[in-house]
Amino acid sequence: MPLQQILPTWLALNNCNFTSPSAMTDPLTGQPYYAGGLNVGDYFDTTEQEANSMSYLANGLLHAGRYRFVQVDSGATAANVKTGTVGYMVNGGQPKLNLVTSYDKGIIGVHEVIYLNIITPGNYGFVQELGVANVLCGATITKAGAVTGDVLNAVANGVVDDPTSQTPVIATLGIALDPPNPNTRVRMFMTATSVQG
Amino acid sequence: MATDPLYNEIDASTLEAVRRGVVFQNLFVDTPFQAKLRRAGVWDPFLGGSGMREGFVYGRPQGAAVAPGQTVTVARQQMNTAMKFYPKAYVSWVPIDDWELDDGSGTGGVINSGPPLVINQYQIFMELMVEMINTMIEMDSFRHGQATAIGVADNRVLNSNGLAEALNNGIDPSWDGNIFSTYGANVRGGVIGPALSAVPLWLGTPTGGTGQIDFNALMLMWGACTITGGKPNLGITNVLGFVAVANALDAQRRDVSNTKHDISWEGLNFNGVDIYADPLAPSSQSSQFLSLAGGGGAAGNNNLIDGAGANTVTGTFTSPLAPSVASKLPSNTLCTVGEVLFFLEAESFKIRPTNKRGWNYGLRRAPMPNNVSMDALFCRLGTNLYNVMPRHNSQAYGFSA
């Protein structure tokens, strides 16, 4: 039960790409320093102001929600693990909640998370699993006249789309808080389930 | 990847040269405003209560020249009332892992201890939490502590009351674009008239651009303070505003004395007003030198913020349709604030820190009950800053360096 409201994040939440599960690595041996208090699986909730103040703006302004310190599976497709894309539980690595992978290597609909920044496969960083997330829209938006309030689904490469049918499906991630726009990050309220891990 | 063998001969035989216990401050800055107020003796500890009441006179008794023997109706109207302010809570916090750090008790700090300890990280925490609180208070002292209302765009009800709110007249915007119709919960311009009013002075152009500060502007500010019985003795402006003032006076070869004051701030004395340069005072250019705006770099936390997560970088506002004549503001015009200058009567301020140790830079350490080593450490201060005679003070904006 790693609910951890008292923890170091060392860097801005959306700028972490650590080689160590504690975020600190001995530069000589390459081994983790197990100290400081950050552990894989730590998750916590933030207010809007707290999330704002823990943002690296070059990767977007973070919002109120739940964040989790996870490892990105070494088999993930690196190009699909970037700011605003979707990750899932590893297909073949279930039921590990704190090991996530890219859209194309995951079990669609299971433990959906939003990547906050580029994380090298095999490395560690924070992902968002509840609240107001910044998601990356695909190169095309299916629905004509996409607007705030539309359902957003995960599609190939881990980007999101506004589908013509607004009925939620297994790949539905949440509700758009901004009008979906091709190749643009928009805010989305996540409708995922909350799970301890 | 580790090398084979792990240590080369230099690393196996030689440590780095490091000065023990020395860390250079490359984020926070020292500021003169509150230091000068404390020197003026306005430190008034808050001993308790539902708030801070400050009585003031706004009305007069009846009186007239009379003929001896005539009769008069002896009526009485209210002549005095009071302002009310509230203590505001400021807290800075860090998590501590007693596996990593020792808190001075000697019971923890498996890592950061013993002969290899170069920097006491716990001491760093203590000093930076105090710096953080001081920075928040300093920046808040230029803004306000009111809730969102007509004329007030930003909700800062948890923040210290500040200069933008104090030095206003309920008609014209202060430097932050807000118009404060109340002060100390009293309505400006109503029953109490202008008792709690100070008129902001626009130094920009009629089209809303920034102008130049000059001798006349300084005299107008001095006059606004003096005509109400004030004795302005403290001038505060950003370093860039200070540059503008100094350059303007020098260019006009005015008779000013350049003095060095004993808190290391280069000061200008103008007509009895010691003007100091405060790096955190409002400015349109300070963010070009200090980390004040935006994300503050990749770490996310290397920017200076006030108690609301904002800063004192100035912007623009649209002036009201009917500004006061004395403000010299153009009507309904987009105005660029630029640099800001305050002429203050230091003795008209009050700084009200609590006398309770736990909330006077006191520590609260809260263990996370199911965690083997993590605690939260809070440094706390209950305080407020306000002005009991706003009309003895003046603010001017709309000039550039």
Image (cartoon, grey):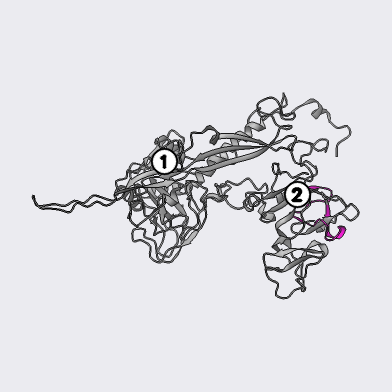
Give the residue at mark 1: B350
The reply to whether residue B274 is visible in this rendering is: no
Specify the amino acid type for callout 2: Arg
SS label for mark 2:
strand
The reply to whether residue B73 is visible in this rendering is: yes
- Quarter of the figure with residue A64: bottom right
Q: Chain of mark 1?
A: B
How many numbered marks, from 0 up? 2
Give the residue at mark 2: A68
Q: Closest to the observer: B73 or A125? A: B73
Callouts 1 and 2 close, C-beta under 8 Å: no
Specify the amino acid type for callout 1: Lys
Q: Closest to the observer: B165 or B53? A: B53
SS label for mark 1:
strand
* Residue B297 lies within the magenta run: no
In the rendered image, the residue lying farthest to the right is A92
Left or right? Give the position of B208 relative to A27. left
